[in-house]
Image (spheres, rainbow, N blue to C red):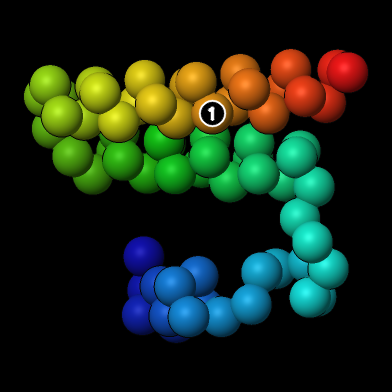
Amino acid sequence: MSDAVFFDRYYGENSTGGKPETGEQHVKNLRLAKSMLAQHYPDCAPLRDLMGKIDLAVASLEKMGDG
């Protein structure tokens, strides 16, 4: 990840122009984070634990969207 992308994501506003992100956007962001983690970190128990938490967050957001 370039410095510009990192600083924009860490310090910047969300990418929706100041509007609150939708649940769908949160799901996309979580899936992107999971993909990046899988790509850059070796498989280990802490990573699997974090991936499981991401999966739970995605499932929760998707369930909320169905209601």
Rendered location of residue 42, percent (x, y): 13, 32
Residue at 76% over, 38% down: 24
Q: Note whether residue 54 is visible.
A: yes
Q: How many marks?
A: 1
Q: State which quadrant residue 58 falls in.
A: top right
Rendered location of residue 27, percent (x, y): 64, 36
* Left or right: residue 53 compared with residue 8: left
Residue 48 vertical position relative to residue 7 in the rendered view, above or below? above
* Left or right: residue 55 compared with residue 51: right
Q: Note whether residue 5 is visible.
A: no
Quadrant in which the C terminus is drawn: top right
Residue 8 vertical position relative to residue 36 in the rendered view, above or below? below
Q: State which quadrant residue 19 falls in.
A: bottom right
Residue 42 vertical position relative to residue 48 in the rendered view, above or below? below
Element carrying mark 1: helix
Q: State which quadrant residue 37 falls in.
A: top left
* Left or right: residue 29 compared with residue 53: right
Determine crowd level at label 1: few under 14, some 14-19, many 20+ residues with C-alpha closer than 10 A: some
Residue at 30% over, 31% down: 50
Residue that label 1 marks: 57
Instruction: Name the one closer to the observer, 37 or 48.
Output: 48
Rendered location of residue 12, percent (x, y): 56, 80
Quadrant in which the N terminus is drawn: bottom left
Residue at 48% over, 80% down: 11
Q: What's the residue type where badge 1 is placed?
A: Ala
* Left or right: residue 61 compared with residue 47: right
Rendered location of residue 66, percent (x, y): 86, 17
Instruction: Name the one closer to the observer, 66 or 40.
Output: 66
Residue at 48% over, 22% down: 55
